[in-house]
Image (cartoon, rainbow, N blue to C red):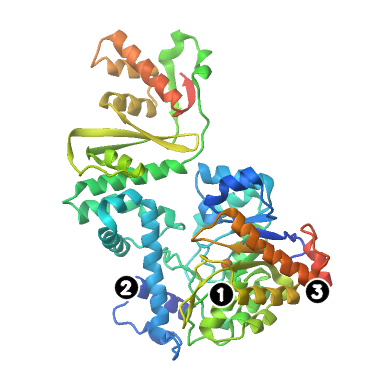
């Protein structure tokens, strides 16, 4: 794949994760949401309702694909059927982009169904970057990698998480999905300054932002996506977009699911923060090249 | 890559409880606030809870039938017996029937319930195919009907029960108190299919099962009629086969017709 930045990808504005509970209200009321993120694996099925509703939503909104089972950091070979079906889904729904997590989910053909952390070493970065290139070549497009929430770190690590992410992004020429809540969670769990993380990633590669709620257990935080975004995470979001410029932003909610209106309203908070930081030059169709030029 | 490969193998073995006295915990940073042991246990617990939740979602009626405590035990045994090889947890429960046949042989209704719930869920996202209607057949002259064969939708499955599994399923679905599990006098066959986007099921007679299996295997309408003649006279066989065909069409089970 030839060297390129993300100038081809659009700025989409403010989105939500597409969840089955909201299929009907989305199709019937066409809420004020600029785009939807879909969980790729849920639609890598032969047919039926999931694909039917996805096609309907896609007819009205831009869509991006977000996976959980690519296992980019695994040391055993890719599941070829997975890559094939991922591409097939992308051909069908023409997403603005495709993302997955910077983690591993299992080895030897098994899936732990969790986003497991990687040791932050040169060796791992090189390994992951090689695999990102394989996926990008196969899909014919750059992918986005998301930072995960983690609860453990390894004695082997020789660098910070943000140095690790930046190294992979540069080596593989891929893009980043910055999960601001995950940064908050990991900074709490591992005692680092969240702002240092944000300062440390290459701004021009950040194509998308995730926001979510979590569960604070006192001495550690679990990333549960079952509650509203908390104020310190909103503050961190404000810091992030002040630093990076306008980035397509969405709220993830996977559990304790409220009515769609509640999430649309929560998304207004993100819009207001962006307005405050970048006012008045925000329009959902502004291409990303403009913001890169403005904030490089 | 040896180092990373070893770390991942060790971590996975730890999650799966395959780690016999390994020192994987030494690979994890220890601290005063949480501690390496607790940090790892977050992953260990999450692995099980996530899968149990997925199984409960796939098998709500089995869960209700067994109660939460027994279902949780069964799910944990299942996790140990069948590590996931699926990209999506939605497919993970596909061996629950087999698992229950060996772990709960004293309650055969459990395996039947699992079989029924799983098969019904497979119809949910089975491949989309066109739906042939009676009108589509209207253009074919009656004298050619004997040579017609049909393609059926891939969602069609038949589940056999010996217990009052389906009445219990229906009561639970309707939020009513189900009757006690009891054995029926004979086996019953339940046809599962999808009409548009909704999974359907109904009781079928053994004769219809035979006719349907033949038709699904590619037999012509004439051949299906002939096979029914073992049970009834020629005219009655023809009428019965025609009724079956009309029902299958009405129920949206047939996707294409072919003339020999
Ligand atoms: Fe996220």
The Cα atoms of the two marked residues, 3 and 1, are separated by 31 Å
CB-based contact (under 8 Å), mark 2 and mark 3: no
Question: Based on the displayed image, in which of its 4 quarters is residue B112 positioned?
Answer: top left
Name which of mark 3 and mark 1 comes first in the sequence. 1
Looking at the rendered structure, whether the residues under marks 2 and 1 are on a common chain is answered as no
**In the foreground, A138 or B16:** B16
The Cα atoms of the two marked residues, 2 and 3, are separated by 50 Å
Looking at the rendered structure, whether the residues under marks 3 and 1 are on a common chain is answered as yes
| Residue A64 horizontal side relative to residue B206, left or right | right
**Residue with the mark numbered 3:** A295
Image quadrant holding the C terminus of chain A, namely: bottom right
**Residue with the mark numbered 2:** B17
| Disc on res. A280 | none
**Residue with the mark numbered 1:** A127
Rendered location of residue B193, percent (x, y): 41, 35
| Residue A176 horizontal side relative to residue B148, left or right | right
Q: Residues within 10 Å of mark 3 (few under 14, many from 20)?
A: some
């Amino acid at each position: 794949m030839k060297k390129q930045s993300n100038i081809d990808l659009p700025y989409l504005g403010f989105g939500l994760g597409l969840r089955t509970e909201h299929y009907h209200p989305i199709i019937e009321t066409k809420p004020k949401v600029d785009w939807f993120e879909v969980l790729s694996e849920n639609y890598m099925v032969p047919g039926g309702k999931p694909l039917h509703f996805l096609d309907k939503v896609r007819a009205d909104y831009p869509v991006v694909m977000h996976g959980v089972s690519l296992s980019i950091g695994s040391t055993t070979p890719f599941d070829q059927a997975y890559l094939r079906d991922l591409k097939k889904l992308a051909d069908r729904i023409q997403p603005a982009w495709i993302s997955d997590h910077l983690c591993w989910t299992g080895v030897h053909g098994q899936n732990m169904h969790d986003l497991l952390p990687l040791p932050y070493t040169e060796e791992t970065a090189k390994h992951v970057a090689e695999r990102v290139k394989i996926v990008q070549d196969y899909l014919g497009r750059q992918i986005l990698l998301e930072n995960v929430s983690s609860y453990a770190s390894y004695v082997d690590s020789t660098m910070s998480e943000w140095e690790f992410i930046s190294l992979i992004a540069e080596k593989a020429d891929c893009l980043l999905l910055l999960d601001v809540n995950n940064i908050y969670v990991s900074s709490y769990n591992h005692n680092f300054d969240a702002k240092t993380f944000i300062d440390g990633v290459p701004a021009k590669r950040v194509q998308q932002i995730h926001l979510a709620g979590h569960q604070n257990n006192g001495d550690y935080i679990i990333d549960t996506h079952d509650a509203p975004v908390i104020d310190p995470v909103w503050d961190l979001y404000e810091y992030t977009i002040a630093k990076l410029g306008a980035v397509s932003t969405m709220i993830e909610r996977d559990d304790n699911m409220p009515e769609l209106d509640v999430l649309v309203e929560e998304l207004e908070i993100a819009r207001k923060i962006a307005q405050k930081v970048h006012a008045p030059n925000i329009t959902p169709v502004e291409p990303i090249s403009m913001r890169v030029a403005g904030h490089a | 890559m040896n180092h990373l490969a070893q770390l991942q193998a060790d971590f996975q073995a730890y999650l799966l409880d395959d780690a016999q006295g390994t020192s994987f915990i030494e690979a994890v940073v220890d601290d005063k606030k949480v501690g390496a042991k607790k940090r790892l246990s977050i992953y260990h617990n999450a692995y099980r809870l996530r899968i149990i939740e997925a199984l409960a979602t796939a098998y709500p009626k089995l869960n209700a039938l067994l109660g939460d405590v027994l279902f949780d035990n069964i799910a944990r045994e299942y996790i140990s017996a069948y590590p996931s090889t699926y990209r999506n947890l939605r497919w993970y429960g596909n061996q629950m029937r087999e698992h229950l046949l060996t772990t709960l042989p004293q309650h055969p209704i459990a395996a039947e319930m699992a079989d029924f719930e799983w098969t019904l869920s497979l119809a949910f996202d089975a491949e989309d195919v066109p739906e042939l209607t009676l009108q589509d057949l209207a253009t074919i002259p009656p004298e050619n009907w004997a040579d017609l064969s049909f393609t059926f939708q891939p969602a069609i499955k038949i589940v056999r029960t010996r217990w009052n599994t389906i009445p219990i399923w229906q009561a639970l679905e309707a939020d009513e108190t189900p009757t006690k599990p009891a054995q029926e006098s004979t086996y019953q066959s339940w046809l599962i299919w999808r009409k548009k986007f909704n999974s359907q099921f109904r009781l079928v007679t053994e004769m219809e099962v035979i006719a349907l299996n033949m038709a699904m295997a590619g037999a012509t309408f004439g051949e299906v009629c002939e096979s029914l003649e073992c049970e009834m006279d020629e005219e009655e066989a023809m009428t019965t086969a025609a009724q079956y065909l009309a029902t299958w069409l009405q129920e949206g089970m047939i996707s294409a017709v072919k003339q020999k």
